[in-house]
Image: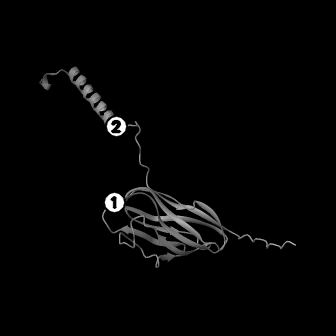
Amino acid sequence: MDIKKIGKENKIYLLRIIIILIYIISAYTIVSVFPSGYITLQSQPTLTVTPLSASIAKGTPIVVAITASNYQNLYAYQFDMNYNPDVLSFKSISFSNALGDVNAGQAFCVPSSNPQIGPGNVKNIACTRTIPGGLDGTAILANITFNTTAIGASNLALSNAVLVSADMQSISHSIVNSAVSVVRATKTPPRTARK
C-alpha cells in the first residue's frame, strides 16, 4: 500500500485507528501492571517532628523524634533543628540505624558527642550511608532530647533540610514541624496516714 496514494479522508481515518490502538494498548498495559484497576501513587517523602504538640512539665526532659516517611533510594540526610532557647536547652542527640548500622560501618553520622549548638538551634545534624545503594521506607532518623528550663512555648522546626539519593540527587520532600508548651509542674499533695 502506497501511503502517498491514500486520500486525505483516508489518512485521517488511519490516524484515528492508530490513536485508538495506542489507547487500547496503553489501557491493556495499565490493567496488566495494575490488575486491581487502581494506580497507586507514591506520596512525597516527609520529614516529621514528633510529638506534633505536647504540654510538658517544667523540669521534665522531652525527646523529639525526626521521622522520614515514604522515602525511596535514601542515601544521606542533613537538617538543622530550631527551638526557643528561653524555654528549652539542648541535652543530647542519638541517631537510629535507619541508614545502616553505624557500629558495623554501614553508615556515618555527625558525632553525637559534639553537635554544633547555637542560640536556639542545633546545626548540621547529618548521616550518610557508607555502603552502596539507597534505602526505601519510613523510619526515625534521630532523637533529640531537650531539657525544659522555663515556662513558655517553643516551636520545634527543621530548616536547611536535605535528603539525598544514592545517585547523589536531591530528593524533594515536605516538612511537618512541631510545637511544645512547657507548663508549671503540678505538686502532688502528700498522703496522710490513715488512723
28 vs 156, nearest the viewer: 28
Q: Residue reaching furthest bottom?
A: 114
Residue at left 42%, top 74%? 110
Which mark is in front, 2 or 1?
2
Q: Secondary structure at mark 1?
A: loop
Seen in the image, is 21 located left or right of residue 136?
Answer: left
Q: Amino acid at mark 1?
A: Gln
Q: Are marks 2 and 1 in contact (CB under 8 Å)?
A: no
Q: Residue reaching furthest right?
A: 195
Q: Residue reaching furthest left?
A: 2
Residue at left 35%, top 69%? 106
Q: Which residue is disc 1 drawn over?
A: 169
**Image quadrant in which you'd find residue 164:** bottom left
**Image quadrant in which you'd find residue 4:** top left
Q: Which residue is disc 2 drawn over?
A: 30
131 vs 115, nearest the viewer: 131
Q: Quadrant of the N terminus?
A: top left
Q: Residues within 10 Å of mark 2 (few under 14, many from 20)?
A: some
Residue at left 64%, top 72%? 60
52 vs 123, nearest the viewer: 52
Q: Residues within 10 Å of mark 1 (few under 14, many from 20)?
A: few
Residue 109 location (% of width, % of height): 41, 72
Q: How is the image coloured?
A: one colour
Residue at left 44%, top 71%? 124
Position of residue 186 relative to residue 74, above or below, is below
Residue 158 location (% of width, % of height): 50, 64
